[in-house]
Amino acid sequence: MNRSVLFVCLGNICRSPTAHGVFEQLLRDAGQSNSIKVDSCGTGDWHLDHAPDRRAQLTAKQHGFNLSHLRSRLICQDDFRDFDYILAMDNNNLRDILALCPDQYKNKCQLFLNFAKELGFQEVPDPYYGGDDGFEDILTMIKVASQNLLQEILVNI
Ligand code: 4NP
């Protein structure tokens, strides 16, 4: 693997698995599955080993992305060494991972939407307690940021 990407949110059942499934599909479409590793995790432990939220799965499926094989896990210390891009969905997630991250790896951690400045949002908002619209909105944001991220990685490989 030439590069590696880790998506991080709070529960690892809505936003980061959506990003994981979308990015995985983009890698397949681009023939890059063997050169770029992708994973996702959460900072909170309420949903360990759970499949993604059914609303996240349904919305993703309607747009051609499969999330059913994913299972929630917590971020761990090895992740900071093992991944090149550690991408937080919101500022709380970023603060939480920076608090765990060894100084030498802190520059790997940033907001995912840094890759989608054109959207005009800093954060992918937590859709968990909202309606189904929230899941459509985050999917749109995640698709744009994922496409841009893949382009950036491919020009730097
Ligand atoms: P996520 O959404 O961080 O995008 O996976 C959430 C999922 C679960 C909870 C919060 C956010 N929760 O409080 O259980």
Image (cartoon, rainbow, N blue to C red):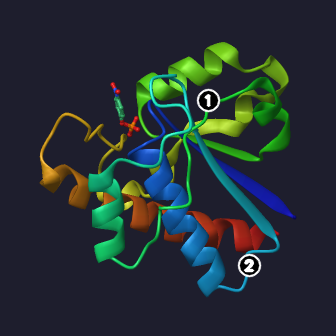
**Residue 1 left/right relative to 29:** right
Looking at the rendered image, the disc whose residue lies closer to the viewer, 1 or 2, is: 1
Nearer the observer, 110 or 41: 41
Q: Quadrant of the N terminus?
A: bottom right
Q: Which residue is mark 2?
A: 32
Where is residue 102? Give x, y as percent: 79, 19
**Residue located 54% across and 25% down the image:** 43
Disc 2 residue type? Answer: Gln
Task: State which image quarter holds ligand 1.
Answer: top left
Q: Which residue is mark 1?
A: 74
Residue 95 appears left or right of 131: right
* Residue 103 falls in image quadrant: top right
Q: State whether residue 120 is above or below residue 98.
A: below
The mark found on residue 126 in the picture is none
Q: Position of residue 50 (x, y in %)?
A: 49, 41
Instruction: Categorize mark 2 by other alpha carbons within 10 Å: few (<14), some (14-19), many (20+).
Output: some
SS label for mark 1: loop
N-terminal of the pair, mark 1 or mark 2, is 2
